[in-house]
Image (cartoon, rainbow, N blue to C red):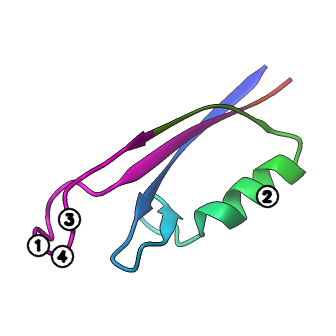
């Protein structure tokens, strides 16, 4: 069994994008791609941070999704 975990972070405009130095892929597009490649969602976790408008360097809202494939 293979397992992959990805974290998506909400940006200023409310869109969730895959977290990484050069990643700008939207969460919905990435999840659709993974599901089309035969991966299934094993678990998901969401954390809520503080408002990015009032505190630009605070922790943002994130969603972590773990995929698995046999």
Give the position of the C terminus as an image quadrant.
top right
Q: Is residue 51 above or below residue 69?
A: below
Q: Earlier in the sequence, mark 3 or mark 2?
A: 2
On the picture, is 19 further left or further right than 38? left
Q: Is residue 21 one of those drawn in magenta? A: no
Q: Would you name the residue on which mark 3 appears?
A: 51
Residue span colored magenta: 46-67
SS for dot 4: loop
Mark 1 to mark 3 CA distance (whole Å): 6 Å
| Foreground disc of the pair 3, 2 | 3
Q: Would you name the residue on which mark 2 appears?
A: 33
The residue most toward the bottom is 13
How many residues crowd mark 2 within 10 Å: few (<14), some (14–19), many (20+)? Answer: few
Q: Are marks 1 and 4 in contact (CB under 8 Å)?
A: yes
* Magenta part, dominant SS: loop
How many residues crowd mark 1 within 10 Å: few (<14), some (14–19), many (20+)? Answer: few
Q: Residue 63, how many percent across, how many down?
A: 47, 47
Q: Which of the 4 image quarters holds residue 55?
A: bottom left
Mark 1 to mark 4 CA distance (whole Å): 4 Å
Q: Are marks 3 and 4 in contact (CB under 8 Å)?
A: yes
Q: Which of the 4 image quarters holds residue 32?
A: bottom right
Q: Residue 64, how many percent across, how many down?
A: 49, 42
The residue most toward the top is 1
Q: Earlier in the sequence, mark 1 or mark 2?
A: 2
Q: Would you name the residue on which mark 1 appears?
A: 54
Mark 3 to mark 2 CA distance (whole Å): 30 Å
Q: Earlier in the sequence, mark 4 or mark 2?
A: 2
Q: Are marks 1 and 3 in contact (CB under 8 Å)?
A: yes
């Amino acid at each position: 069994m293979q397992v992959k975990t990805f974290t998506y972070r909400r940006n200023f405009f409310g869109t969730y994008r895959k977290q990484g130095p050069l990643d700008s892929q939207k969460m919905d597009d990435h999840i659709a791609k993974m599901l089309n490649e035969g991966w299934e969602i094993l678990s998901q976790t969401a954390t809520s941070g503080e408002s990015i408008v009032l505190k630009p360097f605070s922790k943002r809202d994130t969603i972590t999704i773990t995929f698995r494939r046999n």
